[in-house]
Amino acid sequence: MDTRIAPQELARTLQSALVQGLIGSQDTGLIVYDLDRLRARLREACQAFPEGTLHALAVKANPLPKVLLLLAAVDPCIGAEVASLPELELALRAGFEPRRILFDSPAKTGAELRLALERGVNLNADGFQELERIHDLLAGLARQGVSPAGSIGLRVNPQVGAGAIAATSVAGHYSKFGVPVAEFRAEIIAAFGRHPWLTGLHAHVGSQGCSLEQLCAGARTLVDLAEEINDRSPGRVRLLDIGGGLPATYDAADPKPSISDYGVALRQSCPELWSGRYGLVTEFGRAVHANAAFAASRVEYVKVQSGVVTAVTHLGADLFLRKCYNPGDWHHDVLGVAADGRLKAGQAVAQTIAGPLCFQGDLPARDVPLPLLEQGDWVCFRDVGAYTLSMWSRYNSRQMPLVLGLSRKGGQLRFTVLRPRETVEQVLRFWD
Ligand SMILES: *Cc1c(COP(=O)(O)O)cnc(C)c1O
């Protein structure tokens, strides 16, 4: 199975959901999540890394409870990376045991840290002040006879350089995250000397815009630091969390490495990770989720004016927040599908896809060559499985679309509802 959902397959899938009566007239937009593809990516991750690696998937990439349930059940090597109390709760309720959960956040309160320690989840501190706070909390818990089961690490900024997308690069000279290694190497080593409970190192290089070389350089920096600390106090650093950031392919003309490619490159640059001396954690989000889903929206109107053909649809900056606000940095392939679910054919004409929101920037695609769209057609966006629904914007209070899950049995396409279309009542309750 190809990592991405090909155009013909996408159209066949939409057609099948239409024929099976799963898409009502009120469903002006929907997302279809290919659960088989998701499982394939997870298996790939488990095989590409050393045995015992925990792949703590970033919940922020896709927090749908039914997807998290699948992730928690599919393999013990899959975990959850969380950065807020609700994300932590989502992970626990999906069935991730605390030892498979990793709590990262640059702004954890004392109460949140205490809860995380009591629950026994793993956590990464984002700086020195947080380490002192953890030190005090641990002393308090020790007086009550409680010793936390989770491991505690320190996030560093490996400073291997920014990637192609500024807003999602966190390993430049400056980052709001972690402790920069070049500037604070001695202080980091001293912190490990002071706090015997500190046993992990964490780095995350960025998201989407980072090359394999950058990701491997980030991991290499982490390994070098761990070896230096362990030279002074043998066995002190036991867990290395190399973060996520592996890009996904959104454009066939700009293919990205697979999870397996990453495993091979990492083994070459950081053989220590395969030595058994370290436990390994990854935090993939995009690389696992992005290619597994597509979105479809009905064309409500087509306007031909001022030399531009604009198809007005029902999914805009509410779903494609990054694309609409930062169009130069992001891309989704767009397809036209006829009302009956057949891929549209015919001469391609440059068209602009508009969303339903009340501002001019609400254009998830501009000047894309497509067969001429008509009222009632579907506009489909590929590779929407990560950082789309999870970043849903409440602007204009539109209802979140229907989300279907797809799996196959004996050549048949089977759908489940992962999330029904939001009701007006639910939106009103949000604002209450
Ligand atoms: C966002 C994030 C991830 C996931 O990034 P992807 O690009 O989706 O792999 C992992 N770790 C941390 C700390 C993050 O902030």
Image (tube, rainbow, N blue to C red):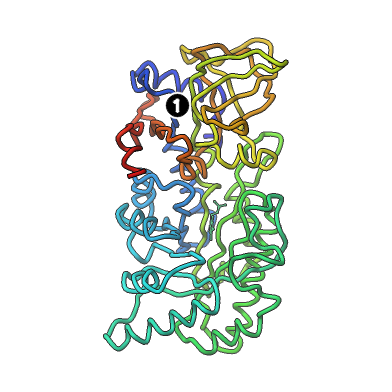
Q: What kind of element bears circle 1?
A: strand
Q: Which residue is mark 1?
A: 29
Q: Is 405 on the left or on the right of 351, as rendered?
A: left
Badge 1, how many Cα within 10 Å: few under 14, some, many 20+? Answer: many
Q: How many marks?
A: 1
Image quadrant assignment for residue 30: top left
The residue sitting at 35% across, 53% down in the picture is 90
Image quadrant assignment for residue 248: top right
Q: Is 140 on the left or on the right of 263, as rendered?
A: left
- Residue 218: % across, % down: 65, 65
Above or below: residue 157 compared with residue 319 = below
Quadrant of the picture in which ligand 1 is shown:
bottom right
Q: Nearer the viewer, residue 269 or 289?
A: 289
Q: Nearer the viewer, residue 120 or 52?
A: 120
Q: Residue furthest left?
A: 144
- Residue 32: % across, % down: 44, 31
- Residue 173: % across, % down: 72, 67
What amino acid does circle 1 point to? Gly
Is residue 205 visible to us here? Answer: yes
The residue sitting at 63% across, 12% down in the picture is 372
Quarter of the rendering occupied by the C terminus = top left
The residue sitting at 50% across, 21% down in the picture is 11
Above or below: residue 408 compared with residue 191 = above
